[in-house]
Amino acid sequence: MSDVSVIGRGITTFGKKDETIKSMLVEASRKAILEAGKPKVDAVFVGNFTAGQLANQEILGSILTNELGLGNVPSVKMEGACASGGLAFRHAYQLVKAGEYDTILVAGAEKMTNQDTETVTHAINNAMDRETNEQVSGLTFPGFFGVVANRYMHEFGAEKKHLAMVALKNRNYARFNPIAQFRKNTTLEEIMNARPVTDPLGLFDCSPISDGAAAVVIQRGKNGVQILSSGQASGTPVMQEVDNMMHIAATNESANKAYEAAGLGPKDIDVIELHDCFSMTEIIAIEELGFFDKGKGWEAVEKGLTKHGGMVPVNTSGGLLSKGHPIGATGIAQIIQIVDQLNQRACNQVEHANIGLSQNLGGTGAYSVVHIFGKKGA
Amino acid sequence: MSDVSVIGRGITTFGKKDETIKSMLVEASRKAILEAGKPKVDAVFVGNFTAGQLANQEILGSILTNELGLGNVPSVKMEGACASGGLAFRHAYQLVKAGEYDTILVAGAEKMTNQDTETVTHAINNAMDRETNEQVSGLTFPGFFGVVANRYMHEFGAEKKHLAMVALKNRNYARFNPIAQFRKNTTLEEIMNARPVTDPLGLFDCSPISDGAAAVVIQRGKNGVQILSSGQASGTPVMQEVDNMMHIAATNESANKAYEAAGLGPKDIDVIELHDCFSMTEIIAIEELGFFDKGKGWEAVEKGLTKHGGMVPVNTSGGLLSKGHPIGATGIAQIIQIVDQLNQRACNQVEHANIGLSQNLGGTGAYSVVHIFGKKGA
């Protein structure tokens, strides 16, 4: 347990945007600082993955600090592929908890839609170990998770419709999230018949290319939603080293560390935001996080256990699949949705949401970081 | 003061190398872990700037962790342009000091010589604020520091030969550093007459494009050179916002924070590694670090005060100018030279070296991070 709270949050709309990465970071950060009551900010941590390649801009820590007029406070960018936002948040939390800083602005952003798909795919593939994996196998991320999905269906009896049910659930949540990239109504049939990406994954099974930014201000004390714990684990970035492709070890191990540090378990969690980069990944994650047995996640989806009225609502923001996935922003955006749930002001509000969990994945399991939150004053 | 030590270090040769960024990181890290006595490593922090663009590889934290067989321990990459290595070290130090981890491997690397100069220049320019600076002014880093050098000479009466004296001093030190990129003897005349890069800076006034990696293991306790303090400051990345181009504020402010935290001042420092990305930058840095008054650094160089027998030897490793500048490795390599000095086993050993200082700059002053070290058992 600790004594660190999220006291402000800000987010841009997600999708294809005209704004630069700097202007998106500034927009989200200004909102977060304003909501926090304009505290003295002691450091600025930024999560980002591809800005060097896709936005022709690094030193985002310093750029954001300067643009916000925060003076000479320390700043840095952290990278861990799609977990970059969660990793920036984790290190900020650890350092506030330790007393190194009182108040930190943590922001995440990605600018991706300005580039063609081939360029974006090339940049994202830097989240694989190119030397021993990608250059041998030719895999992309949709390719990897397509392989996983086929194997999962073969081993456990799931069908393509269970993947579609995840995508539909998250789209139905996104319809009520004003910042979501995809808010249009859809049907199971439309999802099942959508253009294939990598069999069995179709267009709705894959998170989109997105622009966007998200930011939170964290501070010592109890003036907001409390950060109860953080857990992080690394995993192999090399597909051929994975013993069992049905198991994303880093997700499981990061969750266990976070549960242990908080003295809590899956049964205590009221609401989850997890890393549904693909519909298949959500099913594996609900198993790895300890909510359902291995191979039973698809049944939980079929029974509606991962939405309102079920065991634990998952991705009430719309998830990466429908809210969008501006990579560096994703880990922070997940946390914002949990904070909003615990503050009883979320889209798709969950009744009696007292404890929430966020899980942010990088690569095919190279990084996973989990945070557990408790409502203010609890 | 703290209770954290550097207990092992490893470094590759610097220069044009055949190895990949992964293999260089692994080489330096294995040496560091071996020298540290193969302790249990609790986390892996990597400093790197351009690998996404130049080496087609991100997630270096996870890749290194996996390649070293360190299991699922947390890992991350930190970026702050040329200060990336120093920033990774700083955050590792803060978290060990705080008790979050006992032992952290901090590694830095860059792979640059596999690309043509235009591609490298494009990547490095991501360390400027492109939106408000570079796209308006067309400046490169040699261009920026050439402007600074001309202005410095105009204001303070320095001449081109004083820049050359810095380059010659550092080359003369590099001759005895077995990992240095440039170890060939040279003369003031050769430096003065070298091919111009951006007037008044010639080839010897500019740090080279380099490959290389460096790593250290830090641990709670007093089993090595002690880390006495860390100071970091951000500064504007926008040239036209700088009040006084003779002043790199972040260098000064990061040093003052480190001095204050250690309860020490310039007079206590026996040996320095500082960020001589250009010969001009070394002269400004010795002023900003508090060793000489503003505008007097060139006189100190002329009098030999920054070498053996003077006031404080600077860049006894050969500095970025002659040791080489594989960007992410630089901040760690500086620390290794200071550690070696305090362990009485450095190239160009300084007598009675008890307290040392390292300073790592990012951008044109966007980041500066300073560390102060004390010898083992002091």
Image (cartoon, coloured by chain):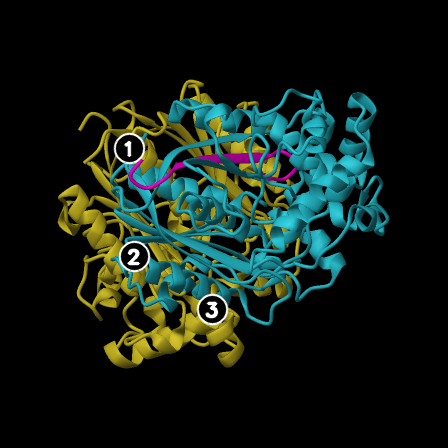
Chain colours: A yellow, B cyan
Label 3 crowd (10 A; few <14 / some 14-19 / many >=20): many
Both labels 1 and 3 in a single chain:
yes
Residue corresponding to mark 1: A98
On whether residue B367 falls in the magenta region, the answer is: yes
Residue corresponding to mark 2: B73
Label 2 crowd (10 A; few <14 / some 14-19 / many >=20): many
The amino acid on which the numbered mark 1 sits, given as a three-letter code, is: Ala
Both labels 2 and 1 in a single chain:
no
Task: Classify residue A361 by image quadrant.
Answer: bottom left
Give SS at disc 2.
Answer: loop
Residue displayed at 66% across by 63% down: B113
Give SS at disc 3.
Answer: loop
Image height of A219 relative to A197, above or below: above
Image height of B363 relative to A165, above or below: above
User: Which residues lie in the magenta part?
Assistant: B362-378
Q: Name the subunit of mark 3.
A: A
Q: Is residue A242 left or right of residue B128?
A: left
**Which numbered disc, 2 or 3, marks the residue closer to the eye?**
2
Task: Locate residue B376, reporting x and y percent.
Answer: 32, 42
On whether residue A336 falls in the magenta region, the answer is: no
**Label at residue A129:** 3
Image height of B103 relative to A339, above or below: below
The residue closer to the viewer here, A312 or A363, is A363
Task: Locate residue A148, reporting x and y percent.
Answer: 36, 74
Quadrant of image for the N terminus of chain B:
top left
Q: Name the subunit of mark 1.
A: A
Q: Is residue B364 left or right of residue B58?
A: right
The residue closer to the viewer here, B38 or B41, is B38
Measure the C-alpha gap from mark 2 to mark 3. 18 Å
